Amino acid sequence: MVNQLIFLYFAVVILASAILTITRKNPVHSVMFMLLLFFHIAGVFVLLNAEFLAAVQLIVYAGAILILYLFVVMLLNVDKESASARANKYWVWMVVFGTVIAAEILLLVSRGTFPANIDRPMRFAAGMGVRELGEALYKQYLVPFEIASVILLVGLIGAVTLAKKRANE
Amino acid sequence: MIPLSWYVMLSAALFAIGVVGVLTRRNIFIILMSIELMLNAANINLIAFSHYLQSLTGQVFVIFVITVAAAEAAVALAIIILIARNRGTVYVDEFNILKG
């Protein structure tokens, strides 16, 4: 019961701050609501016994990616934002489209049953800790882990190469 | 005891909000943030199923999703800086130089 109330709090704040994120005029305000959203998503992760991923969510998403967004938003001048429209001209149709998608998924989920959804008490599972996660990452998923590091290297070099000024300009 | 379907519903609603953000906004920053919203919706789904199926594969996949999101944000923001430097705007409906 307490868990359900906590989940409902997290869900309401997540959805409200998501809607505020995509509707604010000023991108800096959007980034701030995004920060609130990431903190509450980390709370949901804790509720699901994924403490390490909650920490990763806070450190990588809120600490690194969002700060990068904030830097670039502040680097480019966004003063013209207040003068022009924030949404394109088809926005009413797109909102209707999104509502239809959401309603369809919610209807399907609420009518279906999940085989995993047996009435199991929320407990700390023995084989689900950080140690087991690390072992799975470094043993079973070692090759994808290395490929992920190559992707990060590509991102690093690509970002620097794209954004630096040309020497002959 | 929270039913698994609650998490799936939260994830679906968050994903739909991200889709609407991508499709409606003109500012390219908000569009990129909406993509992050959709990635986070997928992460909630992965971790919820990982918890209810008692399997660690979902959590490992979330780590990879976060890695790809970080690389994507870095490259996309570099491209935005280039576009804003060349075109002087951050609105996607003014990026129409490829229109025939």
Image: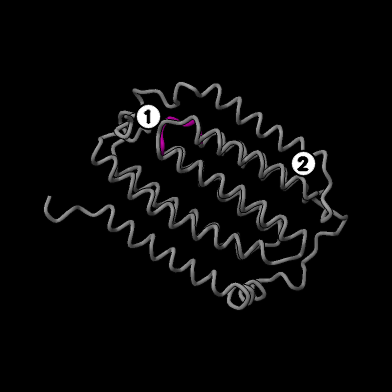
**A23 is within the stretch colored magenta:** yes
Q: Which residues are magenta?
A: A22-27
Tally of numbered discs: 2
Residue drawn 65% across and 76% down?
A131
Bin the neighbour count of mark 2 within 10 Å (Cα to Cα): few under 14, some 14-19, many 20 and up. Answer: some
Residue drawn 11% across and 53% down?
A168
Q: Chain of mark 1?
A: B
- Tag shown at residue B93: 1
Viewer-side residue, B89 vs B96: B96
Could you say which quadrant of the image residue B27 lies in?
A: top left
- Tag shown at residue A116: none
- What kind of residue is marked 2? Val
Q: Position of residue A115 (x, y in %)?
A: 84, 54
Residue drawn 45% across and 43% down?
B32
Residue drawn 62% across and 38% down?
A15
Q: CA distance from mark 2 to mark 1?
A: 36 Å
What residue would you read off at disc 2? A109
